[in-house]
Amino acid sequence: MKKRRILIISGILMLVLVAAYYFYFGFLYKDARNIESEQPAYTITAETLVKDYETDRVKANSKYLNKTIVVLGNVNESDSTTLALTGGVSCSFDKALAAKTGEKIKVKGRCIGFDELFGEVKLDQCTINQ
């Protein structure tokens, strides 16, 4: 009787451990997206993107949020890993970049939403497309 009880408890414990392992590696621990290799869902100008967010944030979030997009615009200012496009789009890069103020460029990145404090749309994991 005691052996049977130990066997049942061991089986249940093993089942719980297998379920926890599957949950951790199947759902929580996933590889990061490779935005550079993804096809963009939209190609849009910086001014239009910001206007869409200012008009209706909920609709714009459902359309652009967490999607890969290409944004066309002129460089307003830049530093080593951040770029601001005229119209109010801020782009974060993983690698250092060399962009000149006033240059017209295409930036591909993941839209992470609208920053109400600064009044700009944020993109991360960006790359410059030619």
Image (cartoon, rainbow, N blue to C red):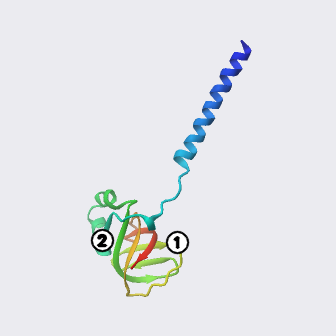
In space, the residues marked 2 and 1 are separated at their CA atoms by 22 Å
Q: Residues within 10 Å of mark 1 (few under 14, many from 20)?
A: few
Sequence-first disc among 2 and 1: 2
Furthest toward the right, the residue is: 2
**Residue 92: percent from left, percent from top:** 47, 72
State the SS at label 2: strand
Question: Which mark, residue 51?
Answer: none
Q: Residue at x 34, y 61 (%)?
A: 64
Cβ–Cβ below 8 Å for labels 2 and 1? no
Q: Residue at x 27, y 72 (%)?
A: 48
Identify which amino acid the numbered label 2 is placed on. Answer: Ile
Q: Residue at x 57, y 46 (%)?
A: 25
**Residue 7: percent from left, percent from top:** 69, 21
> Image quarter for residue 123?
bottom left
Q: Which residue is mark 1?
A: 94
**Residue 95: percent from left, percent from top:** 53, 75
Describe residue 85's horizontal placement relative to residue 125 as left or right.
left
Describe residue 3's horizontal placement relative to residue 128 as left or right.
right
Question: If the image is split into quadrants, where does the C terminus sit?
Answer: bottom left
Furthest toward the top, the residue is: 1
Question: If the image is split into quadrants, where does the N terminus sit?
Answer: top right
Q: Is residue 111 positioned above or below 4 on the image? A: below
Pick the front one: 90 or 105: 105
Q: Which residue is mark 2?
A: 44
**Residue 87: percent from left, percent from top:** 33, 77
Pick the front one: 122 or 6: 6
